[in-house]
Amino acid sequence: MKLNLKILLCLLVSCVYCLSGCQALPDSADSSESSESPELQETFVTYKALPLPDLFVDVPEYYETKSSQFYQEYYICEDASIIITEDTRESQYISNYDYAVGALQEYQNMTSSLELRSSEAITTDKQTNVQTLEFDYTIGDGDDAARLTCLAGYLTDGNSMYIITCKSNTDTYESHRGEFFSVIRSAVISK
């Protein structure tokens, strides 16, 4: 029973981080053995997240900067969060749109339900092309279900894909939507 609970917890944590727009970097994984069972290996993946040397965004000053074992830096305001990550695995030669389609398929596989609100190509204030996805999704079932809404922006410099993930509870999303779009529109990749 204890082993099943640990496995379920690991799967839930992995799902939450994948739904936040992060992409694991396979060459930076770190494994450690569990003290309770030598056969059980728990793997913790390190994510390449802000601060990124090549990408700059304007995050509203009322967002608090936080850190965790998974993110060096991310931003929180009430129930809203902004997480910016970089994927260097398969980003070469892949378009923003194709990457976003693949990401949406991953979200659909990991959520209880997902409903796409919009998919739009936009140009940032600094003339960078970004593919956006806006969608509602549910994690969990029954009374424990969490209903969230996400605005994700995907942009590339040809070598890396940058993912800007902005999310909040669905009930409060409209109050954050404008600031989320402002964050994505402020993105600039330094050359």
Image (cartoon, helix red, strand yellow):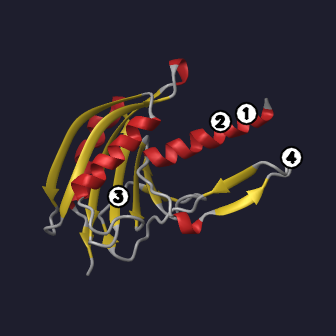
Q: Which residue is mark 4?
A: 36
Whichever of labels 3 and 1 marks the residue nearer the N terminus, that label is 1
- 1 and 2 marks in contact (CB < 8 Å): yes
The residue sitting at 61% across, 63% down in the picture is 29
Q: Amino acid at mark 4?
A: Glu
Q: Amino acid at mark 1?
A: Asn
Whichever of labels 4 and 1 marks the residue nearer the N terminus, that label is 1
x then y, percent, for residue 107: 40, 40
Dividing the picture into quadrants, the one containing residue 130 is bottom left
Label 4, label 3: how many angstroms apart (C-alpha)?
37 Å
Whichever of labels 3 and 2 marks the residue nearer the N terminus, that label is 2
State the residue lying farthest toward the bottom.
191
Label 4, label 1: how many angstroms apart (C-alpha)?
13 Å
Whichever of labels 4 and 3 marks the residue nearer the N terminus, that label is 4
Q: Is residue 99 above or below residue 28?
A: above
**Mark 1 secondary-structure assignment:** helix
> Badge 3: few (under 14), some or many (20 or more) residues near its Cα, within 10 Å?
many
Residue 95 left/right relative to 2: left
- 4 and 1 marks in contact (CB < 8 Å): no
Whichever of labels 2 and 4 marks the residue nearer the N terminus, that label is 2
Label 3, label 2: how many angstroms apart (C-alpha)?
27 Å
Q: Amino acid at mark 2?
A: Leu
x then y, percent, for residue 35: 85, 52
**Mark 3 secondary-structure assignment:** strand
Q: Which residue is mark 3?
A: 163
